[in-house]
Image (cartoon, rainbow, N blue to C red):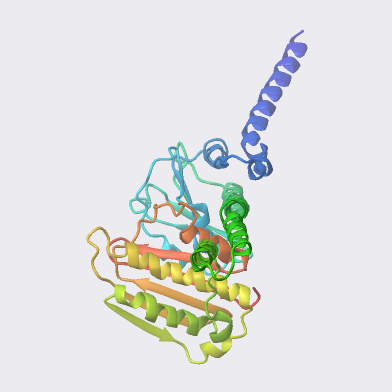
């Protein structure tokens, strides 16, 4: 009887432990339904990455506090850091200085000062095939015990997966949104063109032809009226063609990305800055001619948007004039660094917006194999680096 009770108790404990284990895995294996969200005609909801992150920190790592922040080319897509135990805004310092310590995947973790990093004592580097993509800031465990090597590896692996998945989902949603917007816009333009031609222009032309055929050329008043009506129809056609959206293609194909960008800044945007300093490495113009037209055009528009963004927001609310430094060099590809001495942006400021800002251009850069990264210190500077590798 005692043996039966003992085995029953052991079986119950095993069952409870199994259920707890399965429950802890559920946030990681539950489908985020990305495919359904991409295909829905409504505005897609944000994919829930907070729940698996909190489950990791609470049920697996047993951490008191943790932060998951994207770095480099994925930062504009991922947005602000994930925070445990609460997703409230936290004033983390610039993580740029941590990048200097993570020069290779061999450096897994680094001890940091908890006073500077919101209570975190470890910084775990997150890598992908394209380099450093983020950092996992980990606070002490509940009970102040030590983390095992397996727990550090689990945190690193899941952190890399969360950042990569979140960036991929954000890019997919933006591209799908752009495609829907373009299709809807084309449909509106097509319907507008048909309506104007059918309801306004064609009746006017028909009336003019009837008037010309029924009157003799000697009756100048009728001829003049017909000419006036045809002139009005011609004006409507001209206005219609003028109002239809056109694609303004810069001289990127003819001049190259470097010369086209330099000409655009000097002729269209230079008036908004106190000073613009150009630092262009020797031979860059010739090397940039080898870049295919499509990636070069995407890079051109992204760089122009960065300069426009500095022009609009660099001076802050006071609208003070700022200086701009543009550095263009070649390191296994074209690198354009645009730095202003304006008010800067917070590291926690979300780059998500209407889809027409740096977040959109970061997505387009990623599509053609490049990257857009932002480094900023509030009150000092904002530096945006655009990279287009040769293998893109």
Q: Which one is nearer the viewer's eye here, 341 or 1?
A: 341
Residue 7 rendering spot, x and y as whole percentages: 75, 17
Q: Which one is nearer the viewer's eye here, 150 or 39?
A: 39
Residue 278 rendering spot, x and y as whole percentages: 38, 84
Count the numbered circles shown: 0
- Residue ID at (62%, 77%): 293
Residue 264 rendering spot, x and y as whole percentages: 43, 78
Q: Which one is nearer the viewer's eye here, 133 or 2?
A: 133
Q: Examine the rendered structure and indicate whether residue 318 appears above or below residue 86.
A: below
Q: Examine the rendered structure and indicate whether residue 62 appears above or below residue 200.
A: above
- Residue ID at (31%, 65%): 314
- The quadrant in which the C terminus is found is bottom right
- The quadrant in which the N terminus is found is top right
Tell me which corner region of the image, top left, top right, bottom left or bottom right, holds residue 268. Answer: bottom left
Q: In the rendered view, does 275 fall on the left or right side of 226?
A: left
- Residue ID at (57%, 54%): 196
* Residue 291 seen from this side: yes
- Residue ID at (62%, 36%): 27
* Residue 124 seen from this side: no
């Amino acid at each position: 009887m005692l043996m039966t009770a003992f085995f029953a108790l052991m079986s119950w404990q095993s069952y409870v432990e199994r259920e707890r284990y399965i429950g802890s895995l559920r946030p990681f294996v539950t489908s985020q339904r990305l495919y359904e969200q991409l295909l829905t005609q409504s505005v897609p909801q944000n994919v829930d990455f907070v729940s698996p992150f909190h489950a990791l920190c609470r049920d697996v790592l047993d951490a008191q506090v943790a932060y998951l922040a994207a770095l480099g080319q994925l930062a504009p897509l991922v947005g602000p850091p994930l925070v445990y135990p609460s997703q409230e805004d936290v004033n983390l310092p610039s993580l740029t200085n941590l990048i200097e310590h993570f020069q290779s995947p061999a450096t897994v973790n680094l001890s940091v000062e908890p006073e500077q990093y919101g209570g975190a004592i470890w910084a775990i580097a997150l890598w992908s095939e394209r380099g450093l993509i983020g950092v996992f800031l980990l606070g002490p465990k509940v009970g102040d015990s030590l983390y095992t090597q397996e727990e550090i590896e689990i945190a690193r692996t899941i952190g890399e997966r969360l950042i990569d998945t979140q960036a991929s989902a954000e890019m997919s949603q933006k591209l799908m949104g752009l495609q829907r917007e373009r299709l809807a816009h084309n449909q509106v333009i097509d319907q507008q063109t048909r309506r104007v031609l059918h309801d306004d222009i064609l009746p006017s032309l028909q009336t003019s032809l009837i008037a010309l055929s029924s009157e003799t050329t000697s009756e100048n008043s009728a001829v003049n009226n017909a000419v006036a009506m045809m002139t009005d129809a011609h004006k409507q056609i001209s206005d219609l063609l003028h109002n239809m959206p056109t694609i303004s293609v810069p001289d990127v194909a003819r001049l190259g990305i470097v010369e086209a960008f330099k000409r655009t800044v000097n002729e269209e945007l230079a008036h908004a800055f106190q000073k613009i300093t150009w630092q262009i490495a020797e031979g860059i113009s010739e090397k940039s001619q080898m870049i295919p037209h499509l990636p070069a055009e995407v890079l051109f528009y992204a760089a122009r948007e960065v300069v426009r963004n500095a022009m609009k927001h660099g001076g802050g609310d006071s609208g003070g004039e700022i200086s701009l430094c543009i550095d263009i060099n070649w390191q296994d590809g074209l690198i354009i660094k645009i730095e202003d001495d304006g008010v800067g942006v917070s590291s926690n400021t979300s780059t998500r917006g209407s889809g027409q800002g740096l977040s959109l251009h970061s997505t387009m850069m990623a599509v053609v194999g490049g990257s857009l990264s932002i480094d900023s210190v509030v009150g000092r500077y904002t530096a945006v680096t655009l990279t287009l590798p040769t293998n893109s």
